Image: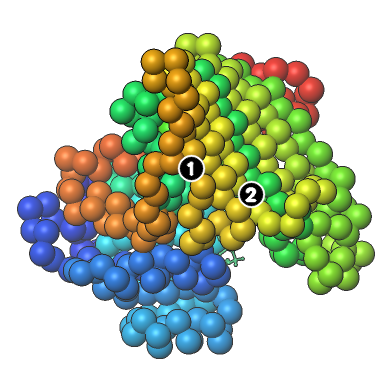
Amino acid sequence: MNHEQQSSAQPAAFPEGTPAAELRVGVVGIGWAGQQHLKAYDALDGVRIVSLAGMEQELRDSLQAEYSIPNAFADWEEMLEHGGLDAISVAVPTFLHAPIAVAALARGIHVLSEKPIARNAVEGQAMVDAARKAGRVLDVAFNHRRRGDIQALKDVIDDGGLGRPYYAKASWLRRSGIPTLGSWFTNPELAGGGPLADIGVHALDYALHLLGEPKVVAVSAATHSELGPQGRGGGKEYSALASAHAFEVEDFASAFLRLEGGGTLLIEASWATYREMDDLLDFTIYGTDGGAELKVQGAPFPAVGQLRVFTDKEGESADYVPPVLPGRAHDAVVEDFITAVRGGEAVWGEHDGSLALYRAQIIDACYQSALEQREVRL
Ligand SMILES: NC(=O)c1ccc[n+]([C@@H]2O[C@H](COP(=O)([O-])OP(=O)(O)OC[C@H]3O[C@@H](n4cnc5c(N)ncnc54)[C@H](O)[C@@H]3O)[C@@H](O)[C@H]2O)c1
């Protein structure tokens, strides 16, 4: 533990070997994501939500009352200045992930950041460096890998049910799902990118997780911005706003990734394309002894996907439908984070954000490939 990095207002983070002690957590950001973190912390024993930060006063007041939170602030800096925190969640627009995480880690506070880790890998690297320097946990919320259907497929793959996987396709496709126009989501300076950075990063995360974390050796990607700038792809309300606000990110992206060992992975991410109305999370994997398809239609949560495994036994088809339980999504991510914090210094080093940083490096390479219209090697 590096005592020099802690301000006097910050007591030592959770002391090793005393797992019964109460952890004091804060949540920055009170939109959809921040509310998932609040609900998850509230359900955990030995965790007290002591601070909340968010700019929407009415909503902040009501969440403060709902979760009986002693301190609430309009700005994240005030919250950190106030002190008394062991861990925080960062659930704010992406351009703020790095400044908040770096400032918190420098104070010895463990950080659970929303995805993507940051706008780009340079900012992500600064966060990872800060976590390593402080000797604190930096986790990033990849809640889709904690879906029950993804976990069921992971079990099939890990048990050797597909043999050696050599191809996968991971898509998250929306017909009309551009997040609010005029908000930070459609501004590259604030978001770092469009659907590739926003929902494609989830598809990339669970695809690499399912494939056993292979290294990506090269990417070839394309981005398109066809419907968003015309006021299409976000419903009626969106169209009305379209004349007054710029849409400056892609609305569709595809990326072809070459993996170490010869495997390949195709990623597709769209906020707006002419296809059926429901969101579709679509994952396909082919291996030497079997293949599988997972389709999650409709709202991504709490929908449970249709998982099918295709294989054969003694030359005959032996396809089957594995049992799938509902996943716990953010509840599981927050619980993992708290478990890592409670694990003490012995496990903190394994939770330094480097897995999320690797996703950012791949996404950066995809945007570079799209811009330069060539394959980029990593
Ligand atoms: N993991 C997921 O499934 C998932 C889903 C949605 C969003 N997200 C991520 O969560 C983050 C937030 O997304 P959202 O949809 O909740 O956004 P949002 O725009 O609905 O909410 C952002 C929140 O940040 C707060 N904020 C902005 N500046 C602040 C400041 N200076 N101090 C304190 N608070 C400040 C706003 O007041 C607001 O409450 C993004 O990184 C996004 O990518 C993740």
- Tell which quarter ligand 1 is in: bottom right
Question: In front of the other: label 1 or label 2?
Answer: 1
Q: Which residue is mark 2?
A: 280
Q: Earlier in the sequence, mark 1 or mark 2?
A: 2
Question: Mark 1: few, some, or many residues within 10 Å (few <14, many ≥20)?
Answer: many
What residue lies at 86% left-to-right and 50% top-to-bottom?
A: 227
Question: Which of 277/253 is in front?
Answer: 277
Q: Quadrant of residue 153?
A: top left
Badge 2 element: strand
What residue lies at 51% left-to-right and 58% top-to-bottom?
A: 303
Question: Which of 337/285 is in front?
Answer: 285
Q: Which residue is mark 1?
A: 307
Say whether residue 347 is left or right of residue 238: left
Question: Which of 24/166 is in front?
Answer: 166
Residue 348 in sight here: yes
User: In the displayed structure, would residue 72 be above or below residue 109?
Assistant: below
The three-letter code of the residue at mark 1 reads Leu
- The image shows residue 378 at horizontal and vertical percentages of 57, 19
Question: Which of 44/74 is in front?
Answer: 44
